[in-house]
Image (spheres, rainbow, N blue to C red):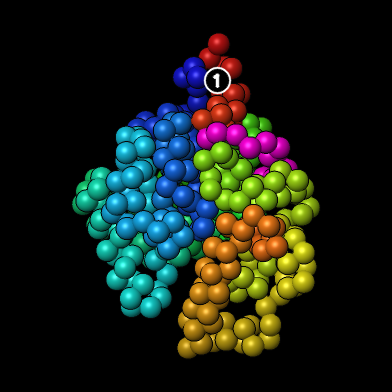
Amino acid sequence: MNKPLLPAAAQQFVELLGIDYPVIGGPMYPCSNPELVAAVSAAGGLGILQPISLTYVYGHDFREGIRMIRELTDRPIGMNALIEKSSKKYQERMSEWIDIALEEGVRFFVTSLGKPGWVAERVHAFGGLVYHDVTEMKWAKIGLDNGADGLICVNNRAGGHAGTKSVQILYDELQSLDVPLVCAGGVGDSNGMQQALDIGYSACQLGTRFIASKECQASEVYKQAILIAKESDIVLSERITGVPVAVINTDYIKRSGLQSGWLARWMLSGNKTKHWMRTIYALKSIWQLKKSLLDETGERDYWQAGKSVAGIDSIESCDAIIHNLMQHFESETK
């Protein structure tokens, strides 16, 4: 691929990270297998490993999993750190994973939930960067006040835990913060990529598009569901984690309903009980998602996806996907 002619913010982003294209392979539970993470980075983007996927779903020791990715590519990779206050054991494990990642040369971290201050302190000591997931100004300020270097701006077209604001509105709200903003949600083809970068975003983070890749180890029936789905087939369900999650409206989702039960809503509304309810939801969803990911029968049709399904009609290699995403900018260099 010819070197693309990128907007200024995107050009600064790729130079800062030492990558070729402003494309981040979003961390996904359970879809971020190590081969997928490596393939995104090898293709010139930035693959982000997801620790629970790496260890629990794919069965790798965390350090050895990173080294496996390094054997597949020597290009930069990143790590996702879910830092919401949870059990002491989980917090200790996440802390250990961050230290191991730093020891193994990872220098880009995406933090989700919570305050990223303690992560930023460690990462900055190694010369690394921390970008924090946000859906609105409130969380953006908390992230930046706690050491974040940039923001992953999760909009209302994202898969998984989607935001509530559009691509444009979220950018308009956050651009005054004067830090790199990454568009997360709704980008599945070159038109979406061009629109986001022309708005002013520094990069785009994609999840759903990379599920429908040759390197992703999601079941073929899951991938085919993404190809078949229309934008209107993406719905928000509270029954997975207690907060809205974007999923394909399959028979399972229709049977389950989209709203949490009264007991769950009551527990989530209380300061003392919400932790327990979130733990219950987390344990349930971790098991369900792992089972549905690898089930080739289609009976466990519990599949997360974003509205970018509208622009996805083929299963391709990560290299081909990134080439197609950048074609508008590549053509400008000819």
Residue 178 is one of the magenta-drawn residues:
no
The picture places residue 84, in percent across and down from the top left corner, at 42, 70
**Residue lying farthest top?**
334
**Which quarter of the image is occupied by the C terminus?**
top right
Q: Is 179 situated left or right of 93 in this image?
A: right
Q: Could you say which is closer to the camera, residue 307 or residue 180?
A: 307
Q: Is 118 situated left or right of 306 in this image?
A: left
**Residue lying farthest front?**
297
Res. 269 image quadrant:
bottom right
Q: Residue at x 51, y 74 (%)?
A: 283
Q: Secondary structure at mark 1?
A: helix
Give the magenta-colored segment's residue range: 306-318
Q: Residue at x 58, y 40 (%)?
A: 213
Q: Is residue 199 above or below residue 124?
A: above
Crowd rating for badge 1 (residues with CA inside 10 Å; few <14, some 14–19, many 20+): some
Residue 314 is one of the magenta-drawn residues:
yes
Q: Residue at x 32, y 35 (%)?
A: 74
The picture places residue 258, in percent across and down from the top left corner, at 72, 71
Give the residue pinned by disc 1: 330
Q: Is residue 276 visible?
A: yes
Q: Is 88 situated left or right of 199 in this image?
A: left
